[in-house]
Image (cartoon, coloured by chain):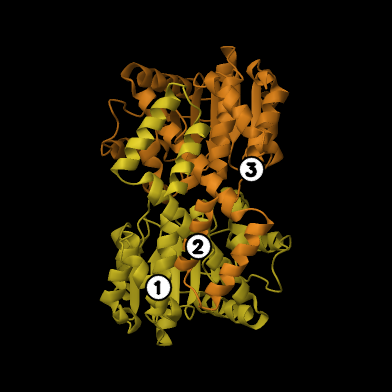
Chain colours: A yellow, B orange
Amino acid sequence: MEKVLTGDRLAAARAITLVENEEPDAEEVLKEIFPHTGKAHRVGITGPPGAGKSTLACELIKFFRKKKRAVGVLAVDPTSPFSGGAILGDRIRMSDCFTDPGVFIRSMASRGGTGGLAKATQDAADILDAAGMNYVLIETVGVGQEELDIINISDTTIVVLYPEAGDRIQTMKAGLMEIADVFAINKCDRDGAEQLADEIKVMLTLRKDLHGWEPPVILTQGTTGRGVDALARAALGHIEHLRKTGALESRRRKGIALKIRTIVEASVARALWLGEENQKKIDEAVERVASRRETPYAAAARFIKRFRKG
Amino acid sequence: MEKVLTGDRLAAARAITLVENEEPDAEEVLKEIFPHTGKAHRVGITGPPGAGKSTLACELIKFFRKKKRAVGVLAVDPTSPFSGGAILGDRIRMSDCFTDPGVFIRSMASRGGTGGLAKATQDAADILDAAGMNYVLIETVGVGQEELDIINISDTTIVVLYPEAGDRIQTMKAGLMEIADVFAINKCDRDGAEQLADEIKVMLTLRKDLHGWEPPVILTQGTTGRGVDALARAALGHIEHLRKTGALESRRRKGIALKIRTIVEASVARALWLGEENQKKIDEAVERVASRRETPYAAAARFIKRFRKG
C-alpha cells in the first residue's frame, strides 16, 4: 500500500473500499499508513437536508484548489450530490468539482448500526490524509449519534443553516449549536438570513465551551459563491487558532479515543452478531425471550460470556 | 416493584429513572416486570423537526382517552413539548394531555452514544407496558442510527411530514420512507399538502417490503384535530393487520434481538469506558497513539483483551 502514500488515487480508493467492507487486509493497510496521518485539515460540513452543504463544499473546494491544495471529500449523506444521490441540476452546477483531478470524492455508504460508518469514515479520512490530501471535507446530515461521532473527527466543523420558517431553532437546539466552529447562513438572498444570523449570535453568547474561539457567522450563497472566501478564511482561521492554543492536539486526542472505541465496538459486533453461526445463536435466544422463558438480560449475559471465551 | 404492575405512576417513573441512570437495581426491576410485557401497542411517531409530531401525538392521545385507554408517551426528542423543550404556546395548546391522569408523559434524555438511549427507551416502554398502558407513543426525530433503533421497537411507525419547499424528498430518501407504516401529512391546510401525499403514494409503489400492508397516507392538521380519527384508525388497523398475518410476532422478535444486542453493547461500554480507572487506561492509550508509537488498532486489541479477562 505504499502507493497510497504516493498519492495514487486508485490505491486510495481501493484502500477505502477495504475498510468499508471490513476486509481482513484493511487493518494491515491502516497500520502502515497510520504514521503518515495527522497532516490534513479535516473539515466537517453539517446541517439539515436542503441547506446547500454540497454546493457550499464545492465552492470551498474551488477556493482551496486555487491555492493548488489537494482536497478529499467524504460524503456520508446518501442524498448528497457527492454521493450521486441528488438531482441532475446539482451535479451539473458542481461539475468543476467532479472533474478536477486534484479533488478526490468518495461516498461513504450508510451501514447497519455497528458504529461501522463512523469507523469507516475515520479510516477513510486517515487514508486521504496519508495520500497527501491537504484538506478532507466530510459532509454529513448532522443529526444522530453516529453523525456526531463522525463530526467529532473533524478539526473544524462548519454548520450550514438557511433561512426557513420557524423550525430551525428547534433543530439547532438539538445539537448543532454545540458542535459548530463556524456557521454558514446559506441561501442568504432569502428573507430572514440576517435575522437568523443574529439569532445564532445571541445563542452563541450562551455557549461556555468556546476556549477563546468565537464561532464566526457568515452569510453565504453557494450558488453564486458569495461569502465563500470569508467562509474558507474562517475555517483556516479556526485551525490556526487551534494550533496556537494547543487545542488542536486535545481535539485530536478526543478523536483518537473515539477511534479506539469504535474499533473495539465494531470488533465485538463482528464476533457476536455477524455470520451464520451467530445468527443461529441469536435466533435461539430470541425464541427463549419471545416465549418469556428468559429475560433479554439473561440472554445478553450469555452472549457476553461467549465473547469472553473468544 | 410490584407497584409498577399495579399501574402506580410514581413507581413507574422511579423504575424508568433507574434504567435511565443504569442503576444496579434496574436489571432486577426489568427482570420482574418482563413477563408482564408485550400487551401494549407501541406506536412510534417520527419525522423532521417542525412537522408537528407532538401536537399530533396529543390529538391521538385524546382519541385513545375517549375510549378510556391508558396512554404512555416517551419523548426522545429533547425539543419536543413533551420534553419541556418547546415554546409555551405549544404546551398551552397541549394542556389537556399534560393534565390528564390517564396519560403518562416522560422525556428520555439524550445520552452519550453507548446505545444507552435506545436501550433506556426500550426498557421504559417495557415498564409502561407492564404498568398497564394500552398504548405507548414514542416520539423521535427520525434520523440517525440510534433513532432507527428506537423506532424498531415500535409495532406501528407513523411518519409525520408537512408541506414545505423541496427538501422533503431528500429527507425521506434518507430513511423515513422505509420505516413508515402510516404517513401523516400534517399542516395539511398549507399549499402542497395533497401534492406531497401524491408523491409519497408514488414512492410507496417502489417499496417491496410491505407484506400485504399498504401504508395509508393521511392528511392531518394537529392544531384543529382534522384527520386525527382517520390517523388513529389507521394505526389500529395496522396492528390488527400485523396480528392477523403473524407479522406482529416477527416484528417483535426483531425488537428482542435488538434489545439483547443493545444490552450487550451497553455492558461492554460500561466495562471498558466508564469510570476513573478506565479513563486512565484510555488516556494512556491515546497518548501512545497520538505520538504514533502505536496504532489505534493495536490499542483497541488491548482493550478487547482486557474485557475478555473481565
Q: Which of A258/A217 is in front?
A: A258
Amino acid type shown at disc 2: Arg
Q: In this view, does B268 lie to the left or right of A67?
A: right
Location of residue B290 with respect to B218 vertically, above or below:
below
Front label number (3 vs 2): 2
Q: Real-space Cα distance between discs 3 and 2?
A: 32 Å
Q: In this view, does B257 lie to the left or right of B103?
A: left
Front label number (2 vs 1): 2
Give the image location of residue B4, x and y in percent.
66, 21
Quarter of the image that includes the N terminus of chain B: top right
Residue corresponding to mark 2: B302
Q: Which residue is drawn at 50% across and 52% down?
A: B308
Amino acid type shown at disc 3: Ala
Q: Which of B165/B203 is in front?
A: B203
Residue reaching furthest to the bottom: A67
Q: Do labels 3 and 2 share a chain?
A: yes
Give the image location of residue A285, x and y in percent.
41, 31
Q: Which mark is residue A3?
A: none
Residue corresponding to mark 3: B109
Mark 2, Cα crowd under 10 Å, few <14 / some 14-19 / many 20+, is some
- Residue A112 makes an appearance in the image: no
Give the image location of residue A282, x and y in percent.
38, 36
Q: Which of B55/A157 is in front?
A: A157
Which structural element holds mark 3? loop
Q: Which of A76/B217 is in front?
A: A76
